[in-house]
Image (cartoon, helix red, strand yellow):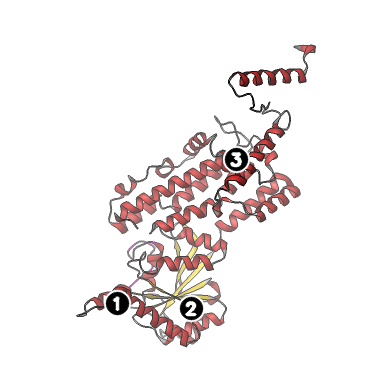
Amino acid sequence: MGKSYDRAEALGALRGVCAESLQAHGLGDAPVFLLSAFEPYELDCPQLREALLKDVRKFEGVLKPIRLDFEVISEREIAEIQEAYELGGLSEVVTRIQCSLETIWNAQLDIAITGESGAGKSTFVNALRGVSDEDEGAAATGVTETTAQPMQYPYPGHPNVILWDLPGIGTPRFQAENYLEAVEFSRYDFFVILASERFKENHVRLAQAIVRQGKRFYFVRTKLDNDLDATSRRKNPPPEEEVLQQIRNDCREKLAKAGLADAKVFLLSSFEINKFDFQAFEETLEQELPSHKRHAFLLSLPNVSSSIIEKKRQLLHQEVWKVALISSLVAAVPLPGLAFTCDVSILLRKLSTYRQDFGLDAESLARLAERSGKPLEVLRAEVHSTLGRSINKDVVIGLLGKATGTGLVMANFLLHRIPIYGALAAGGISFHTTYSMLSQCLEDLAADSQKVLMKAFESEI
């Protein structure tokens, strides 16, 4: 239109055409917003943002949707993001969130497994790690004391979580009075004291020494399968629960006499790790460990029950928004075929760990096949998600393409609480797409993991 062009007049004409069209279709009350992706702060963008936020707040106030803890950004995290943005812009936000994630991902957890010689420490270590006694890298087991010095056994796929198989207390080289010093007591986060057959004085002395040093211990009575088998041979065997309660009471009474009435006692079997008090044992550690070490402990657990898989899913959801935000902020070049920027390498690395956390990588499936006696191909057939079957850059880009335009409700809820919304919009960054893709992948992988578990043991666990 050259010199006759009048911007305000042109915008008015566009707005009028839209209004007339809406009116003709009986939608005359619908608001009209004029936008340009090249001018994210101009035209009606601010008004549209305010209208959307107003509706979100109205929705929250009227319906009061239930939000699980892992779906909400804490006020402390919001304040930290705001502070980082004011100090150094987006680069400082990236640094802060990366440090937060790495603190969680790299948390070191050292768990000492101790007790008298013959209590089954090595077998217990293998059971917790989800490996058999014959597997490569398993703790050595035998009818005699096989551990001459502290031996470390990291969880498969989680090298920062280590079970330490300590020498048996009471052996000639490791007497009770100097035991803790000999095994380098300060190295461990907490101790698990194992006892089989009966409670002994050495257990009390070790527990008292641990408490004096200001650390936690958990008392585990092992080899319950032997106790129950022996009891069942009686002429009139008592109920299983009665036998278990007698064992539990005996341990608690002797600990109480030694001034350790608050000690936690668990009854476990290394050959049936998902039975008896295993769930209570796992939940107690979750509650009493520091948050970053709790994260490491839970993700390292083998997927022996549906509840563990579900807890992993919820736990990993806590970090999805951080991973999505980092991936969006560090990218500089839009992806081919996608109209937004995103660092695929970050997503690729994280999705690979998710796959491993849910036991769907090749090594985890092979271990489960051996433990359950099911053919590997039978278990693989239960994996239906794209990511569960294979993972590479092309797969991730394909998943992002499918996620475009989804996940807006949750993403908008997150973004209107994060004080850098304008910066995200200006950079052409589609945070909601990466958030939605990661969330959907977690759901799919968790579902696959549940199906594999059910197939492995052919029962509801």
Question: Pointer 2: residues within 10 angstroms few (<14), some, or many (20+)?
Answer: some
Which x, y percent locates residue 297? 49, 62
For the residues marked 3 and 1, what is the alpha-carbon distance in whole angstroms?
Answer: 56 Å
Q: Amino acid at mark 1?
A: Asp
**Quick one: SS at disc 1?**
helix
Q: Amino acid at mark 2?
A: Ala
In depth, the one of 423 and 257 nearer the eye is: 257
For the residues marked 2 and 3, what is the alpha-carbon distance in whole angstroms?
Answer: 47 Å
- Disc 3: which residue: 431
Residue 208, can we see it?
A: yes
Which x, y percent locates residue 31? 66, 28
Asked whether disc 2 touches disc 1, contact meaning CB atoms under 8 Å apart, the reply is: no
Residue 118, can we see it?
A: no
Residue 263 image label: 2
Total number of numbered labels? 3
Residue furthest to the left: 235
Question: Pointer 1: residues within 10 angstroms few (<14), some, or many (20+)?
Answer: some
Q: Is residue 335 above or below residue 390?
A: above
Task: Please check the rendered image and state whether residue 149 is part of the magenta-colored stretch, yes or no.
Answer: yes
Which of disc 1 and disc 3 is earlier in sequence?
1
Which of disc 3 and disc 2 is earlier in sequence?
2
Which of disc 1 and disc 2 is earlier in sequence?
1
Residue 227 image label: 1
**Quick one: SS at disc 3?**
helix
Which x, y percent locates residue 117? 38, 80
Please provide the residue range marked out in magenta.
Answer: 130-150
- The image quarter containing residue 346 is top right
- The image quarter containing residue 8 is top right
